[in-house]
Image: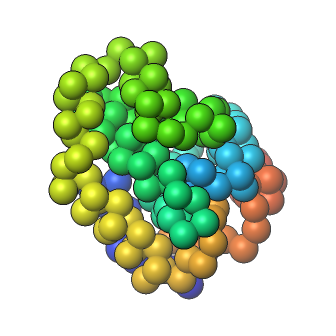
Amino acid sequence: MSLHPDVNKKDHIKGDSNAKLEIVEFGDFQCGHCGAAHPVVEKIIKEFGNQVKFVFRNFPLSEMHQNAREAAKAAEAAALQGKYWEMHKSIFENQEYLQSNDFISHAEKLGLDIQKFKKDMQLSSIAEKIDDDFESGIRSGVNGTPSFFVNGNKFDGDASNLLAVIERSVE
């Protein structure tokens, strides 16, 4: 399966946006496997920073994880204040704290404007971004989280397999 649509201006990109190696993760902020993948992805970005373009697309499995969509909204609301990746990291590193008031705490720690953050979490544009990411996952053949795509192609394996493949490919 391949990625649909391709990475575009609506995506949050970490690393070098012109890098030849593009990794897209479809993830759920409440998913334990995504939480376990987070430090591995962070290691990939740290080790291969300028050689990697990393994108995270929301794929909240709301039936299993009732707080996943709210977590995605919190990350997207933080993005409107330029703190997407900081919120992304904060949520994954504190997965046991995913209630509404916890997102406010994350936002306070990141120095966000709390009133704006609360208002932004209710924006239809944020809900649409999450729905668009989810739809992209469905169109790309995602059936669980985390799902990775490398240079537009679905990667069959977990984050540690991904790290091994990347280490071999950039040597």
Instruction: Give me the residue at 20% from left, 29% from top.
Output: 116
Task: Check the image and tell me how it is coloured.
Answer: rainbow
Residue 26 appears in the rendering: no
153 horizontally vs 126: left or right: right
Number of labels in the image equals 0
Q: Is residue 22 above or below residue 103?
A: below
Q: Is residue 136 above or below residue 128?
A: below
Instruction: Give me the residue at 27% from left, 31% from top.
Output: 117
**Of 110 and 19, which appears nearest the observer?**
110
Q: Is residue 81 above or below residue 111?
A: below
Q: Quadrant of the N terminus?
A: bottom right
Q: Position of residue 27 (x, y in %)?
A: 55, 58
Instruction: Give me the residue at 70% from left, 38% from top.
Output: 39
Instruction: Give me the residue at 40% from left, 27% from top.
Output: 104
Residue 98, image quadrant: top right
**Of 62 and 57, which appears nearest the observer?**
62
Residue 128 appears in the rendering: yes
Q: Position of residue 46 (x, y in %)?
A: 63, 32
Q: Is residue 118 above or below residue 51?
A: above
Q: Position of residue 61 (x, y in %)?
A: 54, 66
**Of 58 and 46, which appears nearest the observer?**
58
Q: Position of residue 21 (x, y in %)?
A: 55, 55
